[in-house]
Amino acid sequence: MTQELYQQAMKFAGEKHSNQKVPGTNSNYLLHLSNVAMEVLIAHTMDKTFDLDFALQIAILHDTLEDTATDYQELKITFGEKIAAAVQALTKDDKFLSKKEKMMDSLQRINQLDKEVGLVKIADRITNLQTPPDHWDQQKITQYLEEARIIEAALKNKNEYLHARLNLKIMEYEKNLSRL
Ligand code: NI
């Protein structure tokens, strides 16, 4: 059942990310993961045309390969190949040097998989488009906004509700520029 899959993924992620904070805060990283999962859950109440169990698990596990010592085999053994492949697509490949190349490569790999993978990427960016940390300068905020627009353009057809919500968040985030 969905609830048990959620708990299993959260337990795994909780162990893996146990020493990680949400950047710039004192909050444990599970805050970020639960916010992404929440976006997916609410999106499913609006539009049931995607696999909730699949999307929820990758939402919770999406940063395990990038940010923790988890490896692909471990994910595959614990959650299956489909979920491991999805998390892999959501992970930057360090063979690329620039941040932008890493993102474009990941978006391309995301687009080769089921729509749930792209949907989680959108939910992740929605979650991250909150008020930027105080130490971010104008350039960094502009760059983050630009990245969000690239994600929006690359993942248009994954989920109408989340896509609209991402556009709203981008519009709201733009206000952080004039505030400076
Ligand atoms: Ni994330």
Image: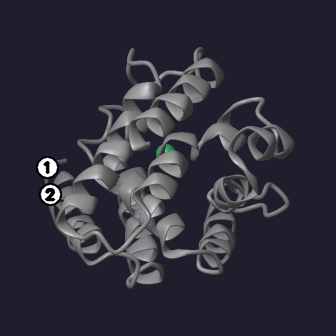
The quadrant of the rendering that contains the N terminus is top left
Q: Closer to the camera: disc 1 or disc 2?
A: 2
Instruction: Tell me whether circle 1 and circle 2 mark residues in contact (CB < 8 Å).
Output: yes
Report which quarter residue 97 is drawn in: bottom right
- Residue shown at 54%/30% (left/top)? 8
Please report the residue visible at 22 percent of the width from the left and 71 percent of the height from the top: 161
Q: From mark 1 to mark 2, how far is it between C-alphas?
A: 6 Å
Asked where in the image residue 173 lies, by quadrant, the reply is bottom left
Disc 2 marks a residue whose amino acid type is: Lys
User: In the displayed structure, would residue 31 be above or below residue 126?
Assistant: above
Amino acid type, mark 1: Arg
Q: From the viewer's perspective, tell me whether residue 13 is left or right of residue 73.
A: left
Kindly identify the residue that appears in the image at 47 percent across and 29 percent down: 7
Q: Is residue 50 placed above or below 64 in the rendered structure?
A: below
Q: Residues within 10 Å of mark 1 (few under 14, many from 20)?
A: few
Percent x, y of residue 37? 37, 44
Residue at mark 2: 175
